[in-house]
Amino acid sequence: MAQRFGGEFSPKPGADEPRAPARPGPLEGRVARRAGGRVNFLFIAPLPLAVSAFFLDPTGLALRLGAFGVLILGAWLTREGIRAQEAWEARKIARRPAIPRKIFGALLTGAGLALAGIAGGSALNAAIFGLLGTVLHLAAFGLDPLRDKGMEGIDTFQTDRVARAVGEAEKTLAEMQDAVRRARDREVEARVERFAATAREMFRTVEDDPRDLTAARRYLTVYLTGARDAAAKFADIYARSRDAGARADFLRLLDDLETNFIDKTQTLLVEDKTDLTIEIEVLQERLAREGVQMQRQK
């Protein structure tokens, strides 16, 4: 096994060497999808209704196809509600979803099962199916976030500006990742994922302090748009010719972009700490003028 050479006069690792800023992994900043299997089951479970409907009279056909459509709509709303909740939970400062999709999904699931019960010719079964479907759906998937998070003392106008800017930046990142998949190169895709994780670190920093938006706007717009366009052009060229030179140039571009994003994120964090220190000092001076002495911890 190879060993690092060292001696009395050998430089110690980390003693004088500058440390590179930590680079997030490709999955950092991303949240694993939850309840994927259960949501998929909501799309599969109504299929027998669609098949069996064609063996009934016109009334039964209409009721069962209606129940199928309502259940599929409920499944779609549930999936969108889970995605909205994941986005809400991933952020320290977030507004509640404008539409409670999971609650509407539960109600539609109950309504779809009630229609299926009516198609079976029993109003009692329809009521039981509808009630049980709604309750079990809420038990399985829960409620939507019903309150804002971390909004106390925050300028809502600035927060809305940040939310719009970050939303557009996330859209640009997604387009960049979609474009690079056309190259059919797993290593390049993984490299773009790592850059996306680095960019999301900046997004979270800006969300934590909306005042950083002005300083970071160029990165969230101009640089990301340029990266997306470069990814699209690289994918088109590489898919046709497998040009190694184009691949190397694109990877170097990602290295430069990632370094710039990391450096800017670190700068934003330092500026935030400096602002906090100034605010503390100003408060201490005001308290001192009021005759209040603050105890310093030793």
Image: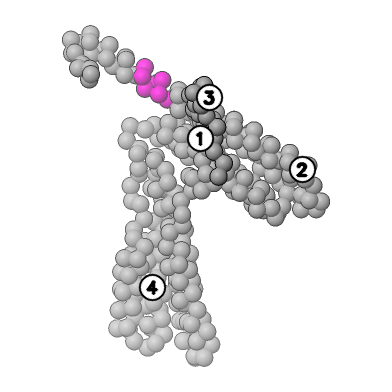
Which of the two discs, 4 and 3, sits closer to the camera? 3
Give the amino acid type for the residue marked by disc 2 in the picture.
Ala
Please report contact status of discs 2 and 3: CB closer than 8 Å, yes or no. no
| Above or below 171: residue 127 | below
- Tell me the residue that label 1 is attached to: 22
- Tell me the residue that label 3 is attached to: 10
Give the residues in magenta: 272-278
* Residue at 69% over, 44% down: 231
In-front residue for pair 256/54:
256
Q: Is residue 284 magenta?
A: no
Q: Position of residue 129 (x, y in %)?
A: 33, 78
| Snapshot quadrant of residue 260 | top right
Gap in angstroms between the C-alphas marked 4 and 2: 55 Å
Please tell me the numbered disc located at residue 111. 4
| First-in-chain label (4 vs 3) | 3
Q: Position of residue 16 (x, y in %)?
A: 51, 22
Which of the two discs, 4 and 1, sits closer to the camera? 1
| First-in-chain label (1 vs 3) | 3
Give the amino acid type for the residue marked by disc 1 in the picture.
Ala
Give the amino acid type for the residue marked by disc 3 in the picture.
Ser
| Above or below 107: residue 58 | below
Please tell me the numbered disc located at residue 109. none
Which of the two discs, 1 and 3, sits closer to the camera? 3
Q: Is residue 277 magenta?
A: yes
